[in-house]
């Protein structure tokens, strides 16, 4: 008998394909799990709509849930329910340890140039806030590039969305 | 076709074609950071197009890929402005980027206020991503504000922003390239 807890635990073992230190549950992209007998319906939201890992994530969830003996139905929901505030505290810590600065909390208003070019962002390596914006965009849609003037290390900053 | 489908197709086509045009800078942008930025913006725009096509596809009983790639050139509803091939003119490319983001912001705001929950939800998600496109456009606008070539490009392109109708000559070549795989190997999957 598959339980919702077992489903959540299984999903927590699936790494994000692009940042494997963090799981799909840490990332907050699993919106809902419903279990009816062996039938398991999972709703998940992409971080970014152009995320090329969308199908990979869906297939990984499908395969993992079949291993549990479930009959999965994984639905991609493209509404406004995900923001970087959904990343769990554990997820944020895992990101930081791996050298990705976790996203700043989302404010009521969208971020501005003044904020992003300011020095309130903390280097994930040395903790200094003497950092500057190098590029709003990075190797994947969810990241920006910054540079730490204290430890002279470039690093990737998770965008706040 | 419903008014809703017509409007969503128009926006999806704009995003797909502009995304395609932006991706033409991949590998040859003026410097590495812009190579990354324009490629990332292109990826986002095509992601928005995919989600919008999906909404229309559900209504019309087709698929996002069929809408994106299996129509004839005159069936696309994108503005003539996004069709223009501007590589390798950076001043005009940035002018289009700035003007497009300005117009797109208003359009997305209207969609976010829609009574249709699917449309409003998707628009709100798109808007979160577009914030970064607007900031990028704004930074370039400030940087080039006194450059004569940029000012001239803004003047040239501004009247064209929402001009629709017959496809431009530039569009024919883009359509040939974009639909080549599906035309040569119908039904291919990978």
Image (cartoon, rainbow, N blue to C red):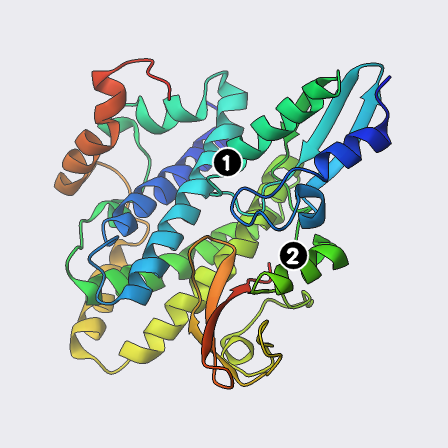
The percent coordinates of residue A116 (x first, y second) are: 52, 75
What's the mark number on residue B51? Answer: 1
Kind of element beneath mark 2: helix
- Examine the image and state in which quarter residue A60 appears: top right
Q: Chain of mark 1?
A: B
User: Which residue is drawn at the image coordinates 47% and 53% (left, top)?
Assistant: A141
Please name whichever residue, A24 or B6, is drawn nearer the observer in this view of the structure: A24
Please name whichever residue, A72 or B140, is drawn nearer the observer in this view of the structure: A72
Disc 2 marks which residue? Answer: A84
The percent coordinates of residue B12 (x first, y second) are: 41, 38
Please name whichever residue, A142 or A2, is drawn nearer the observer in this view of the structure: A2
Q: Chain of mark 2?
A: A
The percent coordinates of residue B52 (x first, y second) are: 49, 36
The percent coordinates of residue A80 (x first, y second) are: 65, 46
Q: Is residue A102 visible?
A: no
User: Which residue is drawn at the image coordinates 56% and 65% (left, top)?
Assistant: A99
Q: Quadrant of the N terminus of chain B?
A: top left
- Examine the image and state in which quarter residue B34 appears: bottom left
Position of residue B68 in the picture relative to residue A130 (left or right): left
* Residues marked 1 and 2 touching at CB (< 8 Å): no
Q: Is residue A136 visible?
A: yes
Answer few, some or many: residues within 10 Å of disc 1's Cα (few below 14, many 20 plus, some between 14 and 19): some
Tell me the CA gap for discs 1 and 2: 20 Å
User: Which residue is drawn at the image coordinates 80% and 14% (left, top)?
Assistant: A38
Kind of element beneath mark 1: helix
Residue B56 lies, with reference to residue B97, above or below; the image says above
Please name whichever residue, A152 or B163, is drawn nearer the observer in this view of the structure: A152
Mark nearest the camera among 1 and 2 is 2
């Amino acid at each position: 008998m598959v339980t919702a807890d077992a489903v959540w635990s299984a999903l927590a073992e699936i790494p994000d394909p692009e940042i494997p230190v963090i799981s799909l549950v840490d990332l907050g992209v699993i919106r809902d799990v419903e279990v009816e007998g062996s039938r398991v319906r999972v709703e998940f939201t992409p971080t970014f709509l152009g995320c090329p890992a969308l199908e990979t994530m869906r297939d990984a969830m499908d395969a993992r849930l079949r291993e549990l003996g479930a009959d999965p139905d994984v639905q991609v929901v493209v509404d406004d329910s995900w923001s970087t505030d959904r990343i769990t505290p554990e997820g944020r810590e895992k990101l930081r340890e791996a050298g990705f600065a976790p996203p700043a909390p989302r404010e009521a208003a969208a971020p501005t140039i003044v904020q992003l070019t300011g020095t309130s962002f903390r280097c994930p390596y040395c903790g200094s806030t003497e950092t500057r914006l190098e590029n709003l965009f990075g190797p994947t849609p969810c990241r920006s590039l910054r540079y730490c003037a204290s430890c002279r290390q470039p690093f990737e900053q998770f965008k706040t969305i | 076709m419903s008014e809703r489908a017509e409007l969503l197709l128009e926006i999806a086509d704009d995003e797909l074609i502009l995304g395609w045009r932006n991706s033409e800078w991949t590998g040859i942008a003026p410097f590495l950071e812009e190579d990354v930025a324009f490629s990332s913006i292109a990826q986002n725009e095509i992601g928005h197009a995919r989600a919008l096509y999906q909404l229309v596809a559900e209504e019309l009983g087709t698929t996002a890929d069929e809408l994106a790639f299996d129509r004839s050139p005159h069936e696309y509803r994108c503005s003539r402005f996004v069709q223009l091939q501007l590589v390798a003119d950076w001043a005009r490319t940035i002018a289009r980027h700035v003007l497009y983001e300005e117009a797109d912001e208003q359009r997305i705001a209207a969609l976010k206020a829609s009574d249709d929950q699917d449309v409003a939800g998707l628009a709100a998600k798109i808007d979160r991503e577009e914030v970064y496109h607007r900031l990028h456009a704004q930074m370039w606008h400030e940087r080039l504000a006194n450059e004569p070539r940029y000012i001239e490009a803004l003047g040239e392109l501004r009247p064209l922003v929402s001009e629709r109708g017959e496809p431009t000559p530039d569009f024919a070549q883009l359509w040939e390239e974009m639909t080549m795989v599906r035309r040569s190997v119908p039904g291919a999957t990978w």
